[in-house]
Amino acid sequence: MAEKTLKSVFMDELRDLYNAEQQLIKALPKMAKTATSAELRKGFEQHLEQTKEHATRIEKIFGGLGEPVKGKKCKGMEGIVAEGSEVMSEDYEGAVMDAALISAAQRVEHYEIAAYGAVHAYAELMGESNAASLLERTLEEEKETDQKLTDLSKEINQEAYQSGTGEEGETKPRQRAARAGTTR
């Protein structure tokens, strides 16, 4: 049996990330189409282009290491993308849908930040400076995207909250339940 080294873990994680990026390349257009906020839609479209570049960077890393370009099914991203699909199938409308989409997108970003942080640290430790540089750039872009989503959520979440409140500040479901003689 071949000895498993940190490089083995590094390559395994890169393959996982490559597949994760491929999954996002398919998911982001759907998220953009579902978004009602023009700014959020534009953000998803921009992140799609950035995600394609992330995949290209991983391909460059594989090439630089003399490894074949291939992914390994990323079950973590598969689950996160499936949850995002569930959100998009809900009957949320307007800012409420956008708030839910931002939440789903931030799960993606946090997963990627964790994964890119780990492979970047491995690359640095192993002296793979070219790979480390490419991974660090992607890691910084993922952090920037997360921050943009956070900033955008402040306005969208407020809008979503206000769309669900009545004149007295009580939420509409509670008002309907009260009229029907039930409480939540």
Image (cartoon, rainbow, N blue to C red):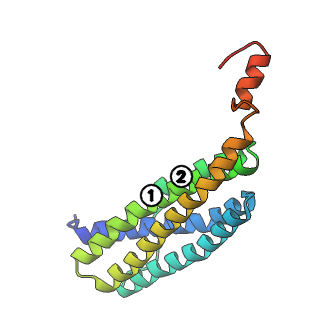
Determine the image quadrant of residue 102.
bottom right
Total numbered badges shown on the rendered structure = 2
Disc sitting over residue 98 in the figure:
none
Which image quadrant: the C terminus?
top right
Indicate the amino acid at tag 2: Ile
For image coordinates 57% across by 57% down, the residue present is 105
For image coordinates 70% across by 61% down, the residue present is 30
In the foreground, 114 or 79: 114
In this picture, residue 109 sits left or right of residue 25: left
Answer yes or no: do the residues labelled 2 and 1 have beta carbons within 8 Å? yes
Which image quadrant: the N terminus?
bottom left
Mark 2 lies on a secondary structure that is helix
In this picture, residue 23 sits left or right of residue 116: right
Q: Name above or below for residue 94 compared with residue 49.
A: above
Determine the image quadrant of residue 3.
bottom left
**In 3D space, how far apart are the residues under numbered discs 2 and 1 (Cα atoms)?**
9 Å
- At which x and y percent is residue 50? 56, 76
In this picture, residue 43 sits left or right of residue 116: right
Judged from this view, the residue extending furthest toward the right is 179
Disc sitting over residue 80 in the figure:
2
- At which x and y percent is residue 42? 68, 69
In the foreground, 165 or 122: 165
Disc sitting over residue 111 in the figure:
1
Q: Name above or below for residue 107 compared with residue 38.
A: above
Badge 1: few (under 14), some or many (20 or more) residues near its Cα, within 10 Å? some
Indicate the amino acid at tag 1: Tyr
Q: Earlier in the sequence, mark 2 or mark 1?
A: 2
- At which x and y percent is residue 65? 34, 84
For image coordinates 51% across by 54% down, the residue present is 107
Determine the image quadrant of residue 38.
bottom right
- At which x and y percent is residue 87? 65, 47
For image coordinates 28% across by 70% down, the residue present is 121
